[in-house]
Image (cartoon, rainbow, N blue to C red):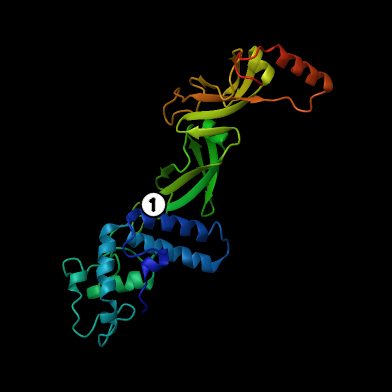
Amino acid sequence: MDYKDYYKTLGVDKTATTDQIKKAYRKLARQHHPDVNPNDKEAERKFKEINEANEVLSDPEKRKKYDQFGADWQRYQQQPGGAGRGGQPGGGFDWSQYTQGGSGGSPFGEGEDFSDFFGSLFGSMGGGRAGGSRPGAGADYQAELELTLEEAYHGGPRTITVNGKNLRLTIQPGVADGQTIRLRDQGGPGRNGGPNGSLLITFRIQPDARYVRTGDDLTQDVPVSIYKALLGGEQTVDTLSGPVKIKVKPETPNGTRLRLRGKGFPVYKQPGQFGDLYLRLTLTLPQQLTDREKELFQQLAALRPAGHGPEA
C-alpha cells in the first residue's frame, strides 16, 4: 500500500503552521467541492483526500503521530512480510511506539470514512480495527457566502446550499468581510454515535462603489457644485439608512469632511449601535460653458481685488 503524503496533498511544507494548513485546506476545498464540481468523480476523490489530510494535519496530536509514522515508512516497507491491507507489520519491526500504550489501538482513533492507508494501516497496528467502536465527531464543512454591502448592513434571512442541502440562516447586521460563523451539527455525520461536525460559513462582502468601510465607519464622496460651495446651501445625501439633508457652509473648501454620527455601519450583535458616516465634499466645476457664462466669470475675476485671497 502506498504511503500518503498529506503535506503534498495540501501543497504545504512539513514546517507549515496551523494557519498555513488551514488556509491551504480552505482554498483546495473550495476548488474541489462537490457543489462546485457536480458529477465529477475525480473532484470528489480529491475532495476526500483533502479532507483526510486536513483531519490529520490540523490536529497537533494526530500530526505528531503521523510525522513519526511517516519517518519510518520506508523502513517499514523493507521489512520481510510487511503489512498489506489489514495485515501485520513483519520482520520484528517494533510498532508499539506508534500505538496507544502499545495495546494495539489506533493512534488516530478514526473510522472507515478515510482511505485504506489511514483506516487500515494506522488502525491495524497490533491488529486493532481503525477507531474500534469509539464515537468520533464528523468533519467540519467549509462554505462561503457573498453579500453586498447593503445586505451586510441590513442582515436578514438567506438560504445556502451545502452538499445538496438547503440551509436557512439569519445574518446578523454588521457582519464583516472574512468573518466566519459556525453552524453546529450541520457538518459531516458523526461516527459510531458521535456528534455531527459543524458548517463554517465565511462571509465575503463585495466592494461598493459608493462607500469605503473601515470597521463600523463609512466614508462617502459627495459631489458639490462650485456655486453651492461658494454660496452655501442644503444638499440631500443618500445613506444606507435613507436620505439625509446636510448644510453646506458658504466658502466650503474642496475636500471638506463632515461627520454624521450614527449613520455608519451597525455594530455586530449590538442592536441600536452604529458607527459614523464621514462625508468628503468634492467640488464639481461646470462644463461646456457658454460665451455668456465665460463673460460672467471673467467679470467676477475682475471684481476680485489683487492680493485679496488666492487668485483664480
Whether residue 170 can be seen here: yes
x, y (%) of residue 158?
A: 54, 39
Quadrant in the picture for the C terminus: top right
- Give the total of numbered labels: 1
**Position of residue 308 in the picture relative to residue 7 (left or right):** right
x, y (%) of residue 38?
A: 58, 61
> Residue farthest to the left?
101
The residue singled out by tag 1 in the image is 197
Whether residue 139 can be seen here: no
Decide: few, some or many residues near mark 1? Use Cα within 10 Å; few <14, some 14-19, many ≥20.
Answer: many
Please tell me which residue is depicted at 28% across the width and 77% down the height of the picture: 73
Please tell me which residue is depicted at 55% across the width and 35% down the height of the picture: 149
Quadrant in the picture for the N terminus: bottom left
x, y (%) of residue 184?
A: 39, 45
Given the image, on which type of amino acid does mark 1 rest? Gly
The image quarter containing residue 131 is bottom left
Please tell me which residue is depicted at 50% across the width and 33% down the height of the picture: 213
Please tell me which residue is depicted at 66% across the width and 16% down the height of the picture: 228
Residue 274 versus residue 13: which sits nearer the camera? Answer: 13
x, y (%) of residue 111?
A: 34, 64
Residue 214 versus residue 71: which sits nearer the camera? Answer: 214
